[in-house]
Image (cartoon, rainbow, N blue to C red):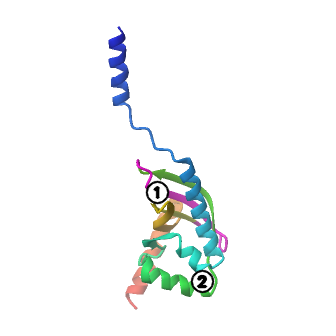
Amino acid sequence: MKKLLLVLMAFCWMASPAIAQSFPDDEKAIIAVLDDFHDAAAKADKERYLGHFTDDGVFLGTDEWERWPLHPEFTEYVGGRFANGGWSYHSEEKNINFSKDGSLAWFDETSISNSNGGRFRGSGVLEKVDGNWKIAHYVLSFLVYNEVGGDVGKIIAAQKEKMDNN
């Protein structure tokens, strides 16, 4: 009977889904990185803002052409933009997940623009570099309610056609 119980327990352990990795200290560190990233943008602090990226980091903006490698394109853009003031978002909610070995994390956050009240989704990947979390990939997207998605699509198509004809 003991052997049967041990075999049954071993089978259940092997057949059970993997338990999600939990890294509470790293989660707190990532929240601090993302919050400081947004604070640096609000204060137009170029060095602190860009310092949150890996050397090969990429920022994807809201316009379809906006794929900014950190060097040199995004660094130059941020320098020009921050000369006239930064941009301000505050995050309402963050979700963070980790790779099994804890060296990578991916996140999504819902944010509100402090300047226009628009709702956005930030998502991306962070990498642990020399013990510090750095943003390797950040994507900023407008949030659009499904009920108005068709109308937004029509506005975008009309704008694209107008731009293509110019």
Q: Check the picture and name the quadrant holding the N terminus.
A: top left
Asked whether the beta carbons under mark 2 and mark 1 sit within 8 Å of each other, the answer is no
Residue shown at 36% from the left, 17% from the top: 6
Which region is colored magenta? 100-119
What residue is shown with label 2? 82
Q: Quadrant of residue 38?
A: bottom right
User: Of residues 61 and 2, which is closer to you in this image?
Assistant: 2
Q: Quadrant of residue 89?
A: bottom right
Residue shown at 33% from the left, 24% from the top: 11
Spatial separation of the CA atoms under disc 2 and disc 1: 27 Å
User: Of residues 5 and 89, which is closer to you in this image?
Assistant: 5
Above-or-below relation of 140 to 71 = above
Q: Amino acid at mark 1?
A: Trp
Residue 118 visible in the snapshot: no
What residue is shown with label 1? 106
* Residue 128 place in picture, x, y as percent: 46, 60
> Which numbered dot is residue 130?
none
Q: Amino acid at mark 2?
A: Phe
Q: Residues within 10 Å of mark 1 (few under 14, many from 20)?
A: some
Above-or-below relation of 111 to 12 = below
